[in-house]
Amino acid sequence: MKYLILGGDWLTRAGFINGMPVKIRAMKDCIVITPQHTRELWGCLEGMSVVNINKQKVAQWLKTFPGALNDTGDIPVIKRGNGQTKA
């Protein structure tokens, strides 16, 4: 089995915290590791075309999401086809 151990202060400076969920993408000669942010999860809801969401329930779900999330506290503004803004 092959594995890679990463550690050091540079991880914190790069935005990673202990226990934080990460997204790993592997390509030929390249591995990309990015932190999983709540902003991205909100974007997943947008990608599923979820129009009417209960923001309080989603926020509660994000608090119980496996691992520690780097909650930036800012929910992205989503503009729908008619130009109306949903926050």
Image (cartoon, grey):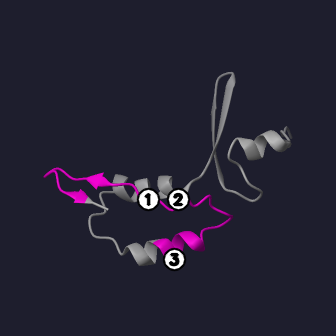
Q: Name the residue that disc number 2 marks.
A: 38
How crowded pointer 3 is (Cα within 10 Å; few <14, some 14-19, many 20+) is rated as few
C-alpha distance separating marks 3 and 1: 13 Å
Q: Where 9 falls versus 28 (above or below)? A: below
Q: Give the mark, 3 or 1, whose residue is nearer the N terminus.
A: 1
Measured in 3D between alpha carbons, the distance from the residue under mark 2 to the one under mark 1, in whole angstroms, is 6 Å
Question: Residue 4: x, y in percent?
Answer: 83, 39
What element does badge 3 sit on? helix
Q: What is the x, y in percent for residue 32?
A: 65, 34
Residue type indicated by callout 3: Gln
- Along the line of sight, which residue is nearer the eye, 9 or 81? 9
Q: Quadrant of residue 44?
A: bottom left
Circle 2/circle 1 CB separation < 8 Å: yes
Q: Name the residue under label 3.
A: 60
In the rendered image of this protein, does residue 55 appear above or below residue 1? below
Determine the residue positioned at 59% across, 52% down: 36
Residue located 17% across and 50% down the image? 81
User: Magenta residues, as a range?
Assistant: 59-85
Question: Circle 1 sits on which residue?
Answer: 42
Q: Does the magenta stretch include residue 77?
A: yes
Callout 2 amino acid: Thr
Three-letter code for the amino acid on which mark 1 is drawn: Trp
Relative placement, left or right, of 28 versus 50 is: right
Quarter in which the N terminus is drawn: top right
Residue most toward the top?
Answer: 29
The kind of secondary structure element at disc 1 is helix
Q: Position of residue 35 (x, y in %)?
A: 63, 48
Q: In this view, does 47 lie above or below 53?
A: above
